[in-house]
Amino acid sequence: MAETPDEVYERTLAEEQAKGSSPPVAEGRAKAARHRARKAESGGDAPAAPVSTPAVSNGTEVAQPVAVAAVAAVAAGAPKAATATMMAPDRLQRLLAVVKPEAIQRVEKEPIDRVNTWPHLMVAEFISLLALTVFLVVFSTFVDAPFRELANINQTPNPSKAPWYFLGLQELLRYFHPQIAGVTIPQWIILGLMATPFIDRNPSTKPNDRKLAIVLFTIFLLMNAVLVILGSLFRGPGFNFIYPWQDGLFFEL
């Protein structure tokens, strides 16, 4: 007894699954076998057997069935026209299998070096503000800062210090000639800061990529901070060098 198209489908599907074919390919081959069985059933009593082996390439199966019923018709003495019609090859059928695309090289997503302003930045700034306020309260409690008498044009206070933002220049005057300390060095510092964007032309905004800019800014900041600290804490009467833990602090600015 000949198999029905559905039985052919089930048998082919089971065979393909037993061979280890992927589900889309196994289902495609089973459908092709059922289609051939139906065509053979509608075309005559001779069963249609798949002769050609389907070619599979890149998830695409090309089935080229051969009409075996035409051979039986020639043996039975069928007319040549009918034989020629039955001998004509069926059209090519492409059964496409769904294959999940997978890149040859996986590209990992680069971590974004960004955080939200709230709460990350605002919390840090608020904590810094509280810490600075506590420091100022404690400092003003233990360090006396009374109002001084009116300035006397006939008597220069000793030591006579510039405001803190000019103490760096005043400190340089202790080591260099006024032309060097007051004009040349500040001029080169200003020109160096102006040339920094042209020296470091890195367009990245990540701190890890801006090592040159960070080094230049750190050098400038440390140099200025050292000069201001020396002028504020380590200079006494006559702007001479002192040790604040021995001679005291001179904050008469």
Image (spheres, rainbow, N blue to C red):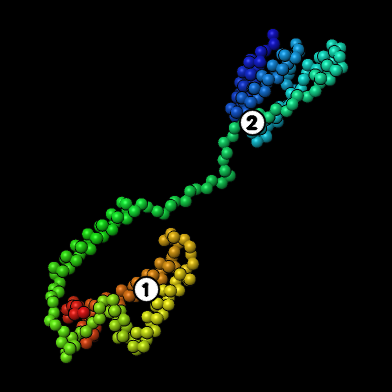
Mark 1, residue position: 220
Q: Quadrant of residue 127?
A: bottom left
Pointer 2 and pointer 1: residues touching (CB < 8 Å)? Answer: no
Q: Is residue 179 left or right of residue 83?
A: left
Mark 2, residue position: 96
Percent coordinates x, y for residue 172 in the rendering: 32, 83
Callout 2: SS: strand
Quarter placement of the C terminus: bottom left
Percent coordinates x, y for residue 76 in the rendering: 84, 11
Closer-to-camera residue (39/30): 39
Query: Residue type at mark 1?
Result: Phe
* Rendered residue at 23%/85% (across/down): 239
Q: Quadrant of residue 38?
A: top right
Residue 144 can be seen in this image: yes
* Rendered residue at 19%/66% (across/down): 136
Percent coordinates x, y for residue 231 in the rendering: 26, 79
